[in-house]
Amino acid sequence: MTPDGVAHMVGQMFMAAFWISAPLLAIGFISGIVISLLQVVTSIQDSGFNSIPRLIAFLGGCLLLMPWMVHKSMAYTIDILGNLSRYGH
């Protein structure tokens, strides 16, 4: 396998990982902003108020997005393993 082929395969791997994790990262970012705004408005500085809703948002996002994430992961894996002959030469 040529160095260009390896670079292409690694680039595909990173892009697949990015697109699979992007929705959860967006959920964490948006919930963090909303919670921070609520803390500023209500002057609550409790750490539990910051972390527990964010964990609940991540759990909800994982439960809702899990079928899509598994489908994307399987499609990537099938693409890599289905065409192993192109990596052998």
Image: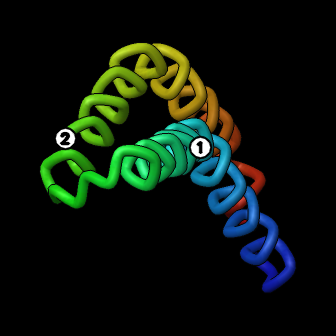
The amino acid type of the residue labelled 1 equals Ala
- Viewer-closest of 70 and 66: 66
| Amino acid type, callout 2 | Ile
Q: Residue at x 73, y 57 (%)?
A: 12
Q: Secondary structure at mark 1?
A: helix
Among numbered discs 2 and 1, the one appearing first in the sequence: 1
Q: Which residue is mark 1?
A: 26
Residue lying at 65% horizontally and 62% vertically, measured from the top left: 14
Image quarter of residue 62: top left
The secondary element bearing badge 2 is classed as helix
Give me the C-alpha separation between circle 2 and circle 1.
17 Å
Q: Quadrant of the N terminus?
A: bottom right
Q: Is residue 9 above or below residue 59?
A: below
Relative to 88, say whether 1 is above or below.
below
- Residue 25 location (% of width, % of height): 53, 48
Of residue 6 and residue 30, the one placed in the foreground of this image is: 30
Residue at image point 23% right, 60% down: 45
Give how far across and how far down residue 82 sits, in percent.
63, 34
Could you tell me if residue 81 is visible in this image? Answer: no
Asked whether the beta carbons under mark 2 and mark 1 sit within 8 Å of each other, the answer is no
Q: Which mark is residue 52?
A: 2
Label 1 CA crowd tier, 10 Å (few <14, some 14–19, many 20+): few
Q: Which mark is residue 42?
A: none
- Residue at the spot 81% in from the left edge and 67% down from the top edge: 8
> With respect to residue 23, does 49 lie above or below?
below
Q: Is residue 43 left or right of residue 9?
A: left
Looking at the image, is 33 positioned above or below residue 57? below
Q: Position of residue 26 (x, y in %)?
A: 59, 43
